[in-house]
Image: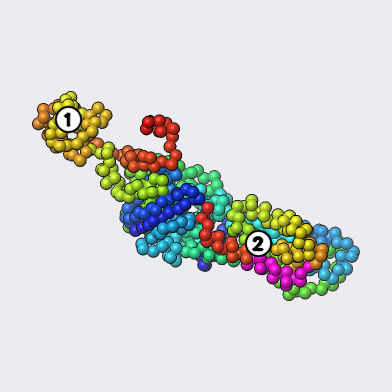
């Protein structure tokens, strides 16, 4: 298992895309937090005691990039056929899958911490550079941390799950954007208030975003709903990973 | 020893590998031959557990995945370009080393063995096919495995590279390892391999040594050309020796040149040519796989008619 983990981390850290995506996320976050959520804040926003929490949750939309890294980690293996080395180097496909889950979990947590820590700092710098002052902030640190970390991690897991199921890079990335952006929107028209239970709708509610006007779930319950989807999805993905030909 | 038993693989309606059983001995290079589409690559993937099918493959009596570190048991090269194009050659191998529990120091050693030390820090995306094959061979020998399974490793290699590969595989086998190698280059295989496994349409056609295979061919025998063919045929018939007409002479299987020369002398037949004629691996391969080709040319079909 240690060997599989070491290999997955080396795969992650020895391709350009990991660094390009991480730098891109950092730059985007610095721009959005520093300029839009800092420099350009309105007087009403400056009076908001939950502004920092909002910055953090807002910046977490960049977690989708963690999912993209997860997709690249898996689909590159099939695209370039290195999967044959991966599967013949380990004595268990389950270990390989678990190593990928752990690796992406670590990266997703790292990305969330990067975004979560830097975005309020960048926002504060933007506010001060503009000569403004923010009212004292009320922070529920524990709540902020678990909801942020769960959201970032869950997006990474969703990306990894789609990659293991679909195995084709374009297909997995398309699914990552189409499921929350289109499929759930359409299903929402049919399901009305029950659409809060759709996977990405539920995940958004963990950080307080809801596209469902008729209602929303408490963060804990929303996280639980998303976990149910993840568990079911991973059972299917695991069975397929064991059973499918490696090509 | 590698022992493959009852390997089968079906793709929807097509049976790609059909109850295939054979052995690959240690200390020898075993060639794996078959026409295009015969199922060679699928067989190798089945043996390695990459594809799901039926049958078992035992490496020294154990399944590959029952070993704690499989890459120290079997080294593989199934596709030359199996690498991330922007991950340098050294990093590509260091990933494989990590996966196999192999020290990273081994990476430099294998790059040196295959002659890629100078491009170790280069991205392999622009490597030629020959360089990619060398990188693939480096990956295969990374864990110093007892078994090597190589699919068309000579493809794209220049003549110097092919000669190097031949010697390398021969030396590797001589160290008590087993090399199982597929190739379409039959002349090369004849020089490289000790034993041979031939399949056609997913079924086993032969699993023997090259020497036995070629000596049993219809093409192998004593070739005689004489000025008095009719008299010589009568002499052969009276001695109950079977023959067949070939290339303006007679081909006699299972006899020595000395005996045939004496027979001609006794019959008073002038001999214009007397020679041992050995079948090449290509001759035997074509004999064995006749009708077992998945894809054949129109010209060949016409020639048969």
Q: Say above or below: B153 vs A161.
A: above
Residue A93 in view here = yes
- The residue singled out by tag 2 in the image is A158
Kindly state the secondary structure of the residue where label 1 is placed.
Answer: helix
Please give the name of the residue rendered at 37% of the width and 57% of the height, measured from the top-left corner: B5
Looking at this view, is A119 or B272 the one in front? B272
- The residue singled out by tag 1 in the image is B233
User: How is the structure coloured here?
Assistant: rainbow
Classify 10 Å Cα crowding around label 1: few (below 14), some (14-19), many (20 and above): some
Looking at this view, is A105 or A189 the one in front? A189
**Mark whose residue sits in front, 2 or 1:** 1
Left or right of residue A212: residue B106: left
Label 2 close to label 1 by CB (< 8 Å): no
Chain of the residue where label 1 is placed in the rendered structure: B
Q: Position of residue B220 (x, y in %)?
A: 25, 39
Q: Does mark 1 fall on the same chain as mark 2?
A: no
Residue A93: say if magenta.
no
Kindly state the secondary structure of the residue where label 2 is placed.
Answer: helix
Left or right of residue A133: residue B40: left
Q: Say above or below: B135 vs B262.
A: below
Q: Position of residue A156 (x, y in %)?
A: 65, 62
Classify 10 Å Cα crowding around label 2: few (below 14), some (14-19), many (20 and above): many
Please give the name of the residue rendered at 45% of the width and 42% of the height, measured from the top-left corner: B156
Please give the name of the residue rendered at 69% of the width and 70% of the height, measured from the top-left corner: A224
Q: Say above or below: B133 vs B55.
A: above
Left or right of residue B200: residue B83: right
Looking at this view, is B241 or A139 the one in front? B241
Is the magenta region chiefly helix, strand or loop?
A: helix
Q: Position of residue B103 (x, y in %)?
A: 47, 62
Magenta extent? A216-231
């Amino acid at each position: 298992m240690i060997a599989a983990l070491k290999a997955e981390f080396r795969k992650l850290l020895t391709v350009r895309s990991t660094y390009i995506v991480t730098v891109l996320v950092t730059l985007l976050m610095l721009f959005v937090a520093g300029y839009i959520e800092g420099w350009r804040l309105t007087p009403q926003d400056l009076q908001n005691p939950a502004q920092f929490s909002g910055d953090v949750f807002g910046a977490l939309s960049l977690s989708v990039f963690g999912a993209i890294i997860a997709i690249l980690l898996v689909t590159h293996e099939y695209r370039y056929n290195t999967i044959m080395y991966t599967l013949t180097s380990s004595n268990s496909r389950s270990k390989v899958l678990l190593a990928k889950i752990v690796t992406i979990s670590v990266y997703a947590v790292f990305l969330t911490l990067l975004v979560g820590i830097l975005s309020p700092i960048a926002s504060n710098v933007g506010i001060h550079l503009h000569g403004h002052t923010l009212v004292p902030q009320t922070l529920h640190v524990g709540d902020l941390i678990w909801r942020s970390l769960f959201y970032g991690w869950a997006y990474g897991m969703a990306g990894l799950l789609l990659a293991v199921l679909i195995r084709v890079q374009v297909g997995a990335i398309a699914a990552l954007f189409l499921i929350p952006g289109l499929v759930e929107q359409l299903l929402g028209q049919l399901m009305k208030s029950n659409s809060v239970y759709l996977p990405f709708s539920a995940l958004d509610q963990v950080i307080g975003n809801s596209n469902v006007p008729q209602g929303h779930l408490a963060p804990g319950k929303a996280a639980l709903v998303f976990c149910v989807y993840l568990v079911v999805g991973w059972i299917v993905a695991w069975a397929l990973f064991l059973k499918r030909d490696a090509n | 020893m590698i022992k493959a038993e009852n390997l089968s693989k079906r793709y929807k309606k097509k049976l790609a590998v059909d109850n295939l059983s054979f052995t690959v001995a240690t200390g020898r290079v075993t060639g794996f031959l078959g026409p295009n589409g015969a199922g060679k690559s699928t067989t190798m993937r089945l043996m390695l557990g990459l594809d799901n099918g039926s049958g078992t493959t035992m490496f020294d009596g154990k399944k590959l995945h029952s070993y704690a570190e499989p890459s120290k048991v079997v080294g593989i090269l199934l596709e030359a370009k199996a690498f991330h194009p922007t991950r340098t050659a050294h990093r590509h191998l260091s990933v494989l080393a990590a996966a196999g529990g192999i020290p990273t120091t081994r990476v430099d050693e294998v790059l040196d063995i295959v002659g890629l030390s100078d491009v170790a820090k280069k991205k392999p995306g622009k490597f030629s096919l020959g360089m990619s094959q060398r990188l693939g061979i480096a990956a295969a020998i990374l864990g110093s495995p007892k078994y090597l399974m190589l699919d068309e490793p000579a493809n794209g290699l220049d003549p110097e590279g092919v000669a190097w590969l031949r010697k390398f595989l021969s030396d590797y086998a001589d160290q008590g390892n087993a090399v199982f190698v597929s190739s379409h280059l039959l002349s090369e295989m004849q020089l490289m391999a000790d034993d041979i496994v031939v399949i056609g349409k997913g079924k086993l056609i032969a699993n023997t040594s090259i020497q036995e295979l070629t000596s049993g061919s219809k093409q192998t025998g004593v070739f005689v050309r004489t000025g008095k063919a009719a008299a010589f045929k009568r002499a052969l018939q009276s001695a109950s020796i079977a023959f067949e007409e070939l290339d303006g002479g007679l081909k006699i299987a299972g006899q020595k040149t000395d005996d045939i020369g004496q027979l001609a002398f006794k019959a008073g037949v002038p001999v214009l040519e007397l020679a041992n004629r050995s079948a090449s691996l290509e001759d035997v391969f074509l004999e064995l796989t006749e009708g077992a080709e998945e894809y054949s040319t129109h010209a060949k079909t016409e020639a048969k008619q």
